[in-house]
Amino acid sequence: MTRQILVTSALPYANGHIHIGHLVEYLQTDIWVRFQKLVGNRCVYVCADDTHGTAIMIRARQEGRSELEVIAEMRESHLKDFTGFGIEFDNYGSTHSDENRALCAEIWQSLRKADLIVERTVERFYDPVEETFLADRFVKGTCPVCESPDQYGDNCEKCGATYDATEVIDPISIFSGATPIRRESLQLFVELEKLHGWLNEWTQTGEHLQEEIANYLQGHFLSKPLRDWDVSRPARYFGFEIPDSPGKYWFVWFDAPIGYIASTHQWCKAHGEKLEDWWKSDQTEIHHFIGKDITYFHTLFWPAMLKTAGFNLPKKVHIHGFLQVNGEKMSKSKGVFVTASTYLKHLDPAYLRYYYASKLSSRTEDLDLNLDEFVARINSDLVGKVVNLASRTARFAQPTGLSAQYPDDGGLFAEAAAEADKIAELYETCEYAKAMRAIMVLAEKANKYVEDNAPWTLKKDPAQAGQLQDVCTVALNLFRQLAIYLAPVLPQLAEQTGRLLNAPMKSWDEAQTPLVASPVNPFEHLMKRVDPAQVQVMTEESQSAPAAAPAATPQVDSSSAAATPAPTTANAFGDTLEALTKEPLTEAYCSIDDFVKVDLRVGRVLTADFVDGSDKLLKLTLSLGGDVTKTIFAGIRQAYEPATLVGRMVVFCANLAPRKMRFGTSEGMVLAAGEGGTQVFVLSPDSGAKVGHRIH
RNA sequence: GGCUCUGUAGCUCAACGGUUAGAGCAGAGGACUCAUAAUCCUUUGGUUCUGGGUUCGAAUCCCAGCGGAGCCA
């Protein structure tokens, strides 16, 4: 039975570029959509830019242009990145569209009619320079609990306290630096509590949510009365003015998810379809793919809005975890923050599509991009196992084409064909990692078949030509099966395979029938091995890119910057002589006696603070265990956010002679690699080391 | 701080409360030479974070501790 499925990914915010963290979601979704289309379901994939809110407004003003210009430019950039990664939306809209405005009004009317909207006066911070109210996270100041400076207005990264922005000591606006003033404002709220009973049932029953998400909602929100949701923002605000409340605008999180419907509407108009058939019909399944950070918007507010306004509820909200790179949070200061466009400059998008697929499950666990593993996976699985099958047999088969009848292969093809349902089920349930493994097992068996039948030996004997053709027919058919199973992940490979064998692949079911009597075209490389040096260049370029590259600032052409260093030979890991050339090895020897004079220790950073009057230094308090501490001024300010250092272990010299500085006395030196400035990389011991350990 | 997850081989991950905890990669040895130093065979790696408990039986369930991730409208 053909299903009718509407799929969405979260709307990227029009204030930043797409990076490889975002791509976890778009690739996960794109793979799912391609799978659905391949098996013959009617599937439409929509998305849009999320364009409203204070951040966009302020940015436009700071850049001296209109919000419309800003969002138009980001839209272009986003689309370019998505296209580059083979993400195929059926429609890519914008929350700043006529369709969205109309739908917002419609849903708003429903909420009014259901008597869910109330007015209340709240006190908010107001930026007198930018003339706008400030969300908590747009205010910084000293934590009212532990008095750490430079904390955001909603919670303290040092002590973990949460509070209201109005409690912060010495607050400033992050936009203008001005001291915000308190101002009363009449706001509109949705009384979510009125739908508490229904939400309880919807979230806790059925298959709408992953189990851990249902638990999370139960434990965190549904166990107590639901707070009213503040959905309005006073002028100035970039968004839609609320029709029945002049001077008030819908909060960006009100109109953003409605953008899913608006984008669908655009698609319907372009394809002669009715919106009702997609959003108000039992025949349609809605599937949202989102990250775990925006869980509550999509699992409480959004269902409540849909329910009230009479739209389809999602059949499933698929929630994924975050991307880490080499075991750490993606971070701009440490150079593991890779944008989509930087990646595309150096590497084939197919690599990332496969790598993510090989690691994704249906759980909300985070996914770690380990760059060494990335190289190994691609080279071993895709090039070594899959593509190799074609590579080692296509040339033998080219003169004759495929055999007219499918030969006896000992049941291999049938065996792999029988896996189709299992693999389909794994795609359907987002267990891509398991699907990839199942496919690789088939690839291993196929390689063994080639090994056992040694076509290269058959080739030497003209009498065995028929046998040779048969063996290659089997191998290429097994390869073709793999290409079909991998098509949702690697659409390009599927197309190339279709061309190689003169038989385009259109459907999942083609894995059930062997291809015979088809000509074989000259073989071209289907996929290149990953060169670790390219990965290296990519991370280096990411490190040298300006920290928060906003689209508006004229892009420093980082490609030319990356090309400048003289190309030097690299070892097998891609390490070049660059660093050694800049700082040659010391020629004089150091005796063991000299070395042991230096007392190197493992310490834990207890506190890390900016130093007033210095743009280079951070003041660190290091613990050596118990109550033994050392104070160190380290020149790493440009490379590290203080908050990211607290709690981590570092290596430092504990018996360096104390040095008086303008700011205090420094009692040691933290060990770090790099050239200085933003290029500083603090050393850490492997796990297992204890605070206070001496380094020998 | 609260909540939801999470900790298994060097790395990435499997394992309905039930044989001797398994795969891939990496490592070691061998075969092969068609293939992008690819492939095939054999093989070394585990105190399942720690400590208690429940059970005939625990990686799995419970409690505590330690570490990691996220969220807190």
Image (tube, coloured by chain):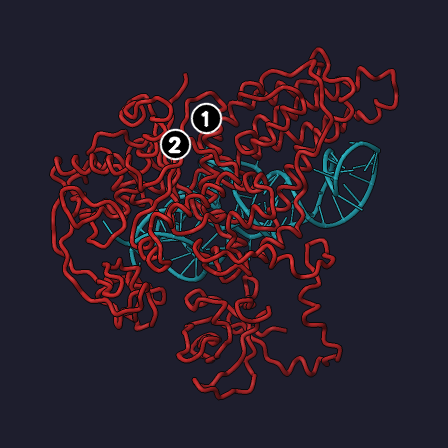
Residue A612 is situated, as x and y percent measured from the top left of the image, at 39, 79
| Residue sitting at x 14%, y 46% | A245
Q: Mark 1 sits on what residue? A: A36
Q: Chain of mark 2?
A: A
Report whether A23 appears left or right of B28: left
Is residue A618 shown above or below A151? Answer: below
Q: Colour of chain A?
A: red
Quadrant housing residue A615: bottom left
| Observer-nearest of A403 and A667 | A403
| Residue sitting at x 37%, y 39% | A48
Mark 2: amino acid: Val
User: Which quadrant: the C terminus of chain A?
Assistant: bottom right
Secondary structure at badge 1 equals: helix
Question: Which chain is displayed in cyan in the rendered image?
Answer: B
Which disc, if any, is residue A221?
Answer: none
How crowded pointer 2 is (Cα within 10 Å; few <14, some 14-19, many 20+) is rated as many
Quadrant housing residue A560: bottom right
Q: Is residue A319 visible?
A: yes
Which disc, if any, is residue A7?
Answer: 2
Report whether A276 appears left or right of A497: left
Secondary structure at badge 2 equals: strand
Is residue A119 shown above or below A415? Answer: below
Q: Residue furthest bottom?
A: A660
Residue A319 is situated, as x and y percent measured from the top left of the image, at 39, 41
Mark 1: amino acid: Gln
Quadrant housing residue A190: top left
